[in-house]
């Protein structure tokens, strides 16, 4: 079954053609990074307008790259939420209209579940159950996943998401938006041990996260030390990244132990971070855990994961009507 996936929840307009929820025939992502860079964050109004311009050419390009005609598409799957409402409406309305015009089913998917479905597009997807860390710009949570349709939330951030912390620290360092990849690059030239930022583990057994403290600590450090001799932004980037990565990995590994899971997975935009991927592989290896992380281009927002999530919903008999609406937050 060929599913056309559409993603427009934030600042990426994406379309993908996926066979049987497993095989990516084409995946196109048009990023709005350059548009929002100078504002240090996504400007919702600008994002919606850019989605309007990009959606038709992006879908056409995905179909062209797949080598399939539109008639081969059996269903359309689009992100329904959470995300920016104005942005979501563009992709979701496009999906409903296209499905209606073609007389094929349309299905709406949850963006967070879609990130987890990026795992099922790998050549060797994880077997169930596994414990999954989702770390993106809007969300950070730990899940126990026992089937494509069932994810139990074990804990989540009480304030900032991990990616949001990368973005805010990058902004404080004057590195622009988005911050993850820039911090990662800068951190390679820094000493992670030179500045020790706080690690928030919260109460003993909690699987929740908190990243607002480290953001404040970086702000305070910058105020006090940025003019000191020998001070280097690369050491701040490295120290910050090391602290965030340590917390993420410890909680993920502890959740796996707690749930007696033999597999761990990492998804979401932050999962593209090489330092995080390498540290996880090392830690999980020591614990005898099997590790699964999507290929880097399927970690950040993309429509292949949306098509995969839609495929599983369609297989379960789910559809959305023409009156279905988007949602900004997970209920
Ligand atoms: O999953 P995603 O594309 O969008 C959301 O659903 O939020 O995640 C975007 C987030 C941004 O905060 C970005 O800074 C972060 O992922 N990110 C990274 C890296 N690449 C993207 N964070 C750390 N290291 C990276 N290499
Ligand atoms: Zn996302």
Image (tube, rainbow, N blue to C red):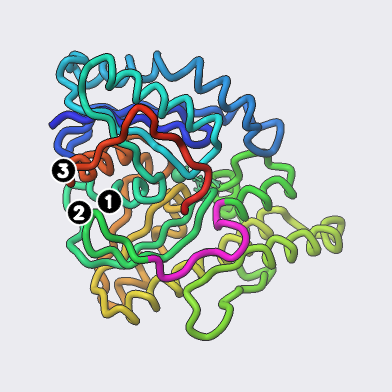
Q: Residue at x 48, y 83 (%)?
A: 205
Residue 315 in sight in this render: yes
The mark that comes first in sequence, 3 or 2, is: 2
Q: Secondary structure at mark 2?
A: loop
Marker disc for residue 125: 2
Q: For mark 1, what is the residue?
A: 119
Label 2–label 1 contact, CB within 8 A? yes
Residue 280 in sight in this render: no
Residue 159 shown in magenta: yes
Q: For mark 3, what is the residue?
A: 315
Q: Residue at x 35, y 25 (%)?
A: 95
Residue lying farthest front?
323
In the picture shown, does residue 75 fall above or below 20? Answer: above
Looking at the rendering, the stretch of residues picked out in magenta corresponds to 153-163
Quadrant of the displayed image that contains ligand 2: top left
Residue 248: x %, y % from top left: 48, 67
Crowd around label 2: few <14 · some 14–19 · many ≥20 (10 Å): some
The mark that comes first in sequence, 2 or 1, is: 1
Q: Residue at x 66, y 73 (%)?
A: 198
């Amino acid at each position: 079954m060929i599913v056309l996936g559409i993603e427009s929840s934030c600042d990426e307009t994406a379309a993908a053609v996926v066979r049987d929820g497993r095989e990516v025939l084409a995946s196109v992502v048009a990023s709005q990074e350059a548009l929002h860079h100078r504002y240090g964050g996504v400007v919702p109004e600008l994002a919606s307008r850019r989605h309007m311009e990009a959606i038709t050419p992006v879908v056409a390009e995905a179909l062209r790259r797949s080598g399939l005609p539109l008639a081969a598409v059996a269903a359309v799957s689009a992100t329904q939420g959470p995300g920016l409402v104005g942005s979501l409406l563009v992709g979701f309305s496009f999906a409903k209209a296209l499905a209606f015009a073609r007389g094929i089913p349309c299905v709406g998917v949850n963006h967070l579940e879609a990130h987890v479905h990026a795992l099922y597009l790998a050549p060797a997807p994880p077997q169930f159950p596994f414990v999954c860390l989702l770390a993106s710009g809007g969300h950070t949570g730990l899940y126990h996943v026992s089937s494509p349709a069932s994810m139990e939330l074990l804990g989540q951030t009480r304030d900032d998401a991990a990616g949001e912390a990368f973005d805010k620290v990058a902004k404080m360092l004057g590195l622009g938006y988005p911050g993850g990849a820039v911090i990662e690059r800068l951190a390679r030239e820094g000493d992670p041990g030179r500045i020790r930022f706080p690690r928030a583990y919260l109460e003993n057994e909690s699987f929740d996260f908190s990243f607002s403290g480290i953001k404040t600590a970086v702000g305070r450090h910058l105020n006090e030390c940025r003019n000191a001799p020998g001070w280097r932004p690369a050491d701040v980037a490295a120290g910050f990244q090391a602290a965030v990565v340590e917390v993420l990995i410890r909680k993920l590994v502890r959740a796996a132990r707690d749930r007696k899971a033999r597999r761990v997975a990492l998804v979401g935009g932050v999962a593209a971070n090489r330092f995080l991927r390498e540290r996880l592989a090392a830690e999980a290896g020591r614990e005898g855990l099997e590790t699964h992380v999507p290929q880097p281009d399927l970690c950040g927002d993309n429509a292949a994961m949306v098509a995969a999530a839609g495929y599983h919903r369609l297989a379960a008999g789910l559809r959305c009507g023409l009156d279905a609406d988007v949602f900004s937050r997970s209920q």
